Image (spheres, grey):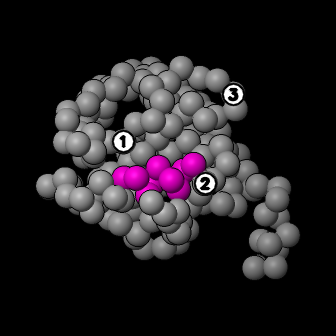
Amino acid sequence: MSVLKILKIPDPILKKISSPVGEITPDIQKLASDLVETIRFHKNCVGIAAPQTGKSIRLIVIDVSVYPKPHPNHGLIILINPVITKKEGKRMGREGCLSVPDFTANVTRAEKVAVEGLNEKGKPVKIDASGFESVVLQHEIDHLDGLVFLDRVTSLKTDVFRRKNYVDKNIKKQ
Ligand SMILES: [Zn+2]
């Protein structure tokens, strides 16, 4: 297993619609375990989508159980070709992303989702998630459709926040 490099905006791969996985080959399984190792490597990281590592395919890994603040969750979830089959309610929460290191934002998402897909062994999986885990699933599935959380923000003026640690770096860049 290896920790993969994370692409950052404005990398064009992050804007692409990812392809469905046809056959679950050893390469796909290897990528899934590399994605798991990659989220374990980054502190408080609760999810990743394959395109964030340059692989434009429909594969996500999430694990909300590692988050310091406890939330109801299903532990580690590996999902191939995930599809949201049900959405319910609304909640607003602060989101961040390894691919968008300089900002966080308030994003409105569904409070509950049902997601169907396959696990890394090709077995059908259905997850009923709520709260934070529901948000993480929606965030990662968005990556498969070329969207980052900034694309979901209502107002770039009032809902986007610069991460304090990155302020100096940004000033130099401008
Ligand atoms: Zn992300």
Q: Quadrant of residue 85?
A: top left
Pick whichever, 64 or 129, lies toward us.
64
The CA distance from mark 2 to mark 3 is: 18 Å
Q: Which residue is mark 2?
A: 41
Q: Is residue 28 left or right of residue 158?
A: left
Q: Is residue 166 left or right of residue 147?
A: right
Q: Residue furthest left?
A: 23
- Can the viewer see residue 58? yes
Q: Secondary structure at mark 2?
A: helix
* Quadrant where the image shows the C terminus: bottom right
Q: Position of residue 26 (x, y in %)?
A: 24, 59
Q: Position of residue 65 (x, y in %)?
A: 56, 30
Q: Is residue 104 left or right of residue 75?
A: right
Which of discs 1 and 3 lies nearer the camera? The answer is: 1
Q: Residue 78: which disc?
A: 1
Residue type at tag 1: Ile
